[in-house]
Image (cartoon, rainbow, N blue to C red):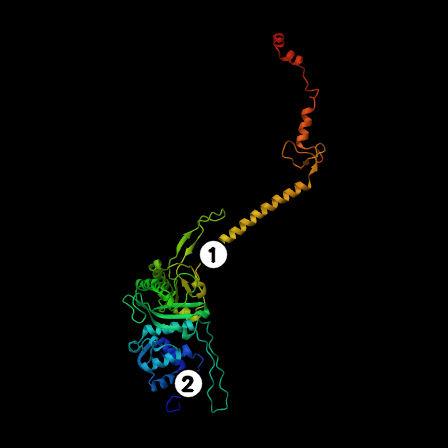
């Protein structure tokens, strides 16, 4: 296309990236679009020109504005950009998705200021952490070299922009295209198997709803995850598994809560704890007590059963921006500390861990028994090495004979010694005749003593 088609001289790459971003987030400011797909540009003009050229082509429009405090405290108004119907089809081509899966144009949301949609866009950017890449320098008429730009350093992000979807219907009844009443729409869904996150459902909270409403959403997630359908073989399978892969960690897919409003550290933590307590029935695993007959097993040992539970992790948008999803920014309901996302999503105290402990106990028990057997064999070897033949009968004699007094080395066995002792006459000192006994103890002796 020539200059007439693109009067603002935007590049095809910039236009394609802007279409891709809006195909995912539906509505955004130029600043947000720059952060999502072109963070390495020198200024906003590259993105603004792409937006204006796409508007000139009928693919984008700006029907709303948003206002936020500036550096000096005064409100700064920014244009909101969204796709037209034709632009939605163009974005579907950029994303490689069917148009029917693209959702709406977000025109009404843009007219209303799109506060929640903008918060979702900020959340996706905080997850994504698009690395700033240097752009091709603009040709200058001056001979002076352009000053070297220092690109900002961002923490490691999670997934790719194409792995995100927004406003995804999760039907507790009905279909994905026509969900029944009581269903919900996930603010955003991320699939990033390359980062060990097959699927993550994201809820963005602007602090505009009571904690009980947020907790009720987690219950509706659980109801959706519990829903079964028939597969092509006529077997019951979870409906969610027909679209997304299982993590293999146990339980249902995880839900991430991102709280965007800065109300103070204590107030935000109180809100997290309130949602946690109100949704406990959805995420609390069940304790299974050990029934092992092992003598070494602890009576209190067992494991947590995560079947039918929804893993819930929570964070604040500002710390997600600062540290990225791999930083210690996630509070897993049921855990007691801030963790990186992989650690937060990993179930602990599982049956596999219990089996590993049982196996360790078995190994220790076998090793102890082996040591006892070695001690017995060593004792037998010592006894065999110290034995001799009885000089009387030739039987083997062992040191420390168990019968009678210990046998001196080279002496007779206990049996021969006992037999010899029984055949010897009594000693002179102890020999007493019957007559002497009668004289000493008889009746005549008693009469004489009187």
Q: Which residue, as the protein is rendered here, is positioned at the far front?
A: 233
Which residue in the structure is indicated by mark 1? 353
Which residue in the structure is indicated by mark 2? 12
Which numbered disc flags the more N-terminal residue, 1 or 2? 2
Q: Considering only vertical position in the picture, is 241 above or below 52?
A: above
Q: Where is residue 287 drawn, in percent x and y?
A: 40, 53
The image quadrant where one finds the C terminus is top right
Which residue lies at the image location 68% right of the left edge and 36% below the top edge?
Answer: 396
Q: Where is residue 2 drawn, in percent x and y?
A: 40, 91
Instruction: Return the residue nearer the eye: 383 or 70.
Output: 383
Horizontally, is 137 left or right of 82 in the view? right
Q: Where is residue 196 drawn, in percent x and y?
A: 45, 67
Q: Secondary structure at mark 2?
A: helix
Quadrant assignment, res 204 = bottom left
Instruction: Return the residue nearer the eye: 302 or 209.
Output: 302
* Residue 84 shows up from this direction: no
How would you rate the neighbour count of disc 2 (Cα within 10 Å): few for under 14, some for 14-19, many for 20 or more?
few
Q: Which residue, as the protein is rendered here, is positioned at the far left?
A: 181
* Residue 315 shows up from this direction: yes
Which residue lies at the image location 31% right of the left edge and 81% below the top edge?
Answer: 85
């Amino acid at each position: 296309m020539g200059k007439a088609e693109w009067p603002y001289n935007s590049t095809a790459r910039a236009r394609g990236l802007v279409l891709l971003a809006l195909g995912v987030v539906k509505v955004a400011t130029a600043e947000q679009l720059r952060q999502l797909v072109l963070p390495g540009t020198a200024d906003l003009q590259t993105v603004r020109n792409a937006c204006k050229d796409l508007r000139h082509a009928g693919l984008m429009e700006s029907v709303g504005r948003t206002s936020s405090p500036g550096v000096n405290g005064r409100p700064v108004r920014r244009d909101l950009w969204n796709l037209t119907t034709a632009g939605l089809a163009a974005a579907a081509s950029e994303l490689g998705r069917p148009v029917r899966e693209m959702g709406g144009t977000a025109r009404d949301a843009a007219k209303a200021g799109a506060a929640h949609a903008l918060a979702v866009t900020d959340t996706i950017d905080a997850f994504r952490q698009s690395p700033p890449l240097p752009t091709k320098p603009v040709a200058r008429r001056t001979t002076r070299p352009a000053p070297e730009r220092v690109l900002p350093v961002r923490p490691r992000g999670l997934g790719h922009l194409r792995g995100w979807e927004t406003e995804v219907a999760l039907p507790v009844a009905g279909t994905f295209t026509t969900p029944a009443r009581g269903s919900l729409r996930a603010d955003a869904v991320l699939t990033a198997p390359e980062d060990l996150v097959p699927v993550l459902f994201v809820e963005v909270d602007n602090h505009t709803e009571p904690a009980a409403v947020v907790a009720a959403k987690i219950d509706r997630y659980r109801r959706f995850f519990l829903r079964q359908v028939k597969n092509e073989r006529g077997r019951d399978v979870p409906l969610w598994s027909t679209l997304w892969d299982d993590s293999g960690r146990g339980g249902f897919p995880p839900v991430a809560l991102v709280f965007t409003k800065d109300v103070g550290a204590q107030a935000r933590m109180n809100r997290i704890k309130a949602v946690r307590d109100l949704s406990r029935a959805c995420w609390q695993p069940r304790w299974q007590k050990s029934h092992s007959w092992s003598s070494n097993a602890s009576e209190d040992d067992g494991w947590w059963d995560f079947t039918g539970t929804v893993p819930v992790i929570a964070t604040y948008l500002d710390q997600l921006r600062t540290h990225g999803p791999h930083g210690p920014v996630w509070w897993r309901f049921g855990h007691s500390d801030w963790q990186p996302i992989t650690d937060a999503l990993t179930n602990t105290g599982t049956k596999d861990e219990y089996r590993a402990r049982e196996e360790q106990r078995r190994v220790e028990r076998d090793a102890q028994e082996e040591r006892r057997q070695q001690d017995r064999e060593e004792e037998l070897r010592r006894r065999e090495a110290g034995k001799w033949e009885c000089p009387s009968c030739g039987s083997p004699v062992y040191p420390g004979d168990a019968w009678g007094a210990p046998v001196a080395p080279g002496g007779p066995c206990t049996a021969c010694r006992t037999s010899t002792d029984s055949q010897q006459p009594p000693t002179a000192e102890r020999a007493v005749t019957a007559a002497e006994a009668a004289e000493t103890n008889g009746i005549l002796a008693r009469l004489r003593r009187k």
